[in-house]
C-alpha cells in the first residue's frame, strides 16, 4: 500500500474509534514505513493524534498489554514498585505464530479456546494477527483482584506468564497429535524444520508466546500489518475454521467488531489458581526430569523389572496404540535396549494388538526417533494423554513407595527404585 492508501484506510470513522477505544490507559507505539518504531512512551487520545502519526509515516499501531494511570510517566529506568503504583491492570494476550502456516495456527487457537471454555471463560477475544497467526485475549476484568493476598495488578508479568505456560502445557500433547494428523506422520512433521528435533514438542512448529516482559506491546485490532498490509482483524469463534488471509484485506473486513469483551468479573479465577499452583510445582517436575535424564544403565534392563503400565501396554491394547509407540520407544531406549531389540519388541507387541497398527507406521516412527541426536524422555505418570487415558495405569506397591498415592513420577524411574 502507498501512503495515500494507508491514510484513506485509517481515516475511516469506525477504524479511528476502534483504535482509540483500545488505546485508553495504554502506552501506544507505531511502526514506520522503514520498519523503525516511534519513540516511547506515547499515547493516543484524539482522532487527530492518530491521523497525525499516520501522515508522519506510521503504518501499524501497537498497544501495551498493561493498563496505566498515566502512560506518559513511564520510563525505562523505573523501579518495580514505581511501575506497580502506576499500573491499573493488564490483559492476557496469547500470541500464536506458526511457520507451518495458518492451518497449524488455527489448531493451536482452537486448543487454547477449548481450555478457556473448560474454565467457563466464554467472552474471550479472538483476532487474526495480520500475518500468520492469531491473538487470543482474556481481558483484565476476568482476573481476581488479589492472588495469594497480593494485588494482581502488581504481579505482572509473573501471573500472565504462569497462565500462558500452564495453557501451553495443557494443550501440548493434543496439539502435537493435531499437527501430526495435519502432516500425516512424525516423519512428515519433522521435515518442516531444519536439523534434528531436540524435543518432541508442538512448539517447535507453532509458537504460543509466554515470556513477554514489562511494557510488552501487541498489534492493535484493526491496525494494518506493515509487511502483509492485512488487517489485524477481530473474528468470531465460528469463523476460525473457514478463515482465509484474504478475508483480512482492508477492503473486505467488517468494521466495528470488539476484541476486548465485557467478560464476567473474576471469571478466570480458577484458571489463575491452577496456573499458579502448577508453576509452583514446576521446579519439582524439573528435578524429576533431571533424574530421568541421568538414568543410563550399563546393561539392558529385563522386562520383569518394568513397571505395571509398560507391562500392560506390552500385553497388547485396543486403544492408545499410536501414543504407546512413543511410550515404548522412549522407555525401552532409556532401559538400555539397542535399536535392533527395540524394533523386534515393537513388532511382537503389535502382533498382540487388536487391531494391530500398520507396520509402515511403526517403521516410520522408528526411523524418526533414530535420527534424533539423543533419546527423548518418556511421558511422566501424571501426563493426562498417556497411561491413565488408555487404561494401563495400575500402580503397585513400588509405584506408591509405602503411601496411598503414586510417588514415582515417571515409568523410567521404576526399575531403579526399591520397594
Image: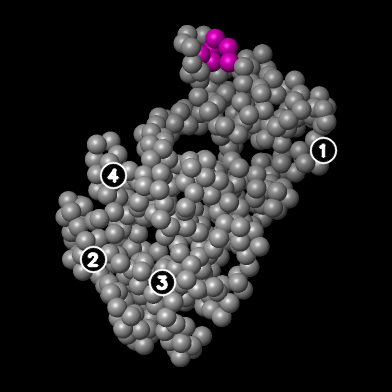
Whether pointer 2 and pointer 3 mark residues with C-beta atoms closer than 8 Å, the reply is no
C-alpha distance separating marks 3 and 1: 56 Å
Q: CA distance from mark 4 to mark 3?
A: 27 Å
> Element at badge 2?
helix
Q: What residue is pinned by disc 4? A: 145
Marks 2/3: CA distance? 19 Å
Query: Where is mark 1, residue-wise?
Result: 359
- Measure how far apart labels 2 and 1 are at the Cα level: 62 Å
Residue 182 falls left or right of residue 296: right
Q: Which residue is mark 2?
A: 71
- What residue is pinned by disc 3? 18
Say whether residue 282 is visible: no
Residue 385 image point, x, y percent = 60, 34
Reading the chain from its start, which is encountered first: label 4 or label 3? 3
Question: Is residue 217 depicted above or below 327 in this figure?
Answer: below
**How many marks can you see?**
4
The stretch of residues the image draws in magenta is: 395-400
Amino acid at each position: 500500500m502507498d501512503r495515500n492508501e494507508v491514510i484513506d484506510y485509517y481515516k475511516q470513522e469506525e477504524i479511528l474509534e476502534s483504535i482509540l477505544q483500545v488505546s485508553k490507559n495504554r502506552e501506544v507505539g507505531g511502526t514506520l514505513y522503514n520498519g523503525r518504531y516511534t519513540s516511547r512512551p506515547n499515547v493516543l487520545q484524539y482522532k487527530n493524534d492518530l491521523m497525525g502519526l499516520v501522515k508522519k509515516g506510521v503504518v501499524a499501531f501497537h498497544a501495551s498489554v498493561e493498563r496505566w494511570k498515566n502512560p506518559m510517566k513511564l520510563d525505562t529506568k523505573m523501579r518495580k514498585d514505581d511501575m506497580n503504583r502506576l499500573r491499573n491492570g493488564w490483559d492476557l494476550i496469547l500470541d500464536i505464530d506458526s511457520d507451518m502456516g495458518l492451518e497449524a495456527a488455527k489448531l493451536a487457537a482452537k486448543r487454547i479456546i477449548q481450555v478457556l471454555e473448560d474454565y467457563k471463560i466464554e467472552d474471550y477475544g479472538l483476532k487474526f494477527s495480520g500475518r500468520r497467526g492469531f491473538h487470543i485475549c482474556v481481558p483484565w476484568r476476568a482476573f481476581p483482584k488479589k492472588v495469594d493476598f497480593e494485588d494482581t495488578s502488581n504481579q505482572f508479568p509473573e501471573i500472565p506468564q504462569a497462565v500462558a505456560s500452564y495453557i501451553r502445557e495443557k494443550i501440548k500433547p493434543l496439539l502435537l497429535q493435531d499437527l501430526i494428523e495435519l502432516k500425516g506422520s512424525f516423519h512428515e512433521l519433522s521435515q518442516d524444520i531444519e536439523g534434528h528435533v531436540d524435543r518432541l514438542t508442538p512448539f517447535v512448529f507453532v509458537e504460543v508466546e509466554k515470556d513477554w516482559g514489562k511494557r510488552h506491546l501487541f498489534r492493535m485490532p484493526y491496525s494494518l500489518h506493515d509487511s502483509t498490509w492485512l488487517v489485524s482483524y477481530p473474528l468470531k469463534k465460528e469463523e476460525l475454521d473457514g478463515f482465509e488471509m484474504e478475508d483480512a484485506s482492508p477492503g473486505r473486513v467488517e468494521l466495528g467488531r470488539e476484541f476486548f469483551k465485557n467478560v464476567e468479573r473474576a471469571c478466570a479465577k480458577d484458571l489463575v489458581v491452577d496456573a499458579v499452583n502448577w508453576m509452583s510445582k514446576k521446579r519439582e517436575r524439573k528435578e524429576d526430569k533431571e533424574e530421568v535424564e541421568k538414568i543410563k544403565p550399563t546393561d539392558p534392563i529385563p522386562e520383569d523389572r518394568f513397571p505395571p503400565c509398560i507391562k500392560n501396554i506390552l500385553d497388547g491394547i485396543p486403544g492408545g496404540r499410536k501414543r504407546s509407540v512413543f511410550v515404548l520407544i522412549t522407555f525401552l531406549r532409556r532401559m538400555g535396549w539397542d535399536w535392533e531389540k527395540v524394533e523386534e519388541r515393537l513388532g511382537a507387541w503389535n502382533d498382540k494388538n487388536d487391531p494391530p497398527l500398520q507396520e509402515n507406521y511403526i517403521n516410520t516412527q522408528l526411523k524418526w526417533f533414530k535420527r534424533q541426536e539423543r533419546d527423548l524422555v518418556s511421558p511422566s505418570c501424571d501426563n493426562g494423554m498417556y497411561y491413565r487415558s488408555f487404561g494401563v495405569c495400575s500402580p503397585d506397591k513400588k509405584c506408591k513407595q509405602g503411601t496411598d498415592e503414586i510417588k514415582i513420577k515417571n515409568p523410567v524411574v521404576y526399575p531403579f527404585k526399591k520397594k
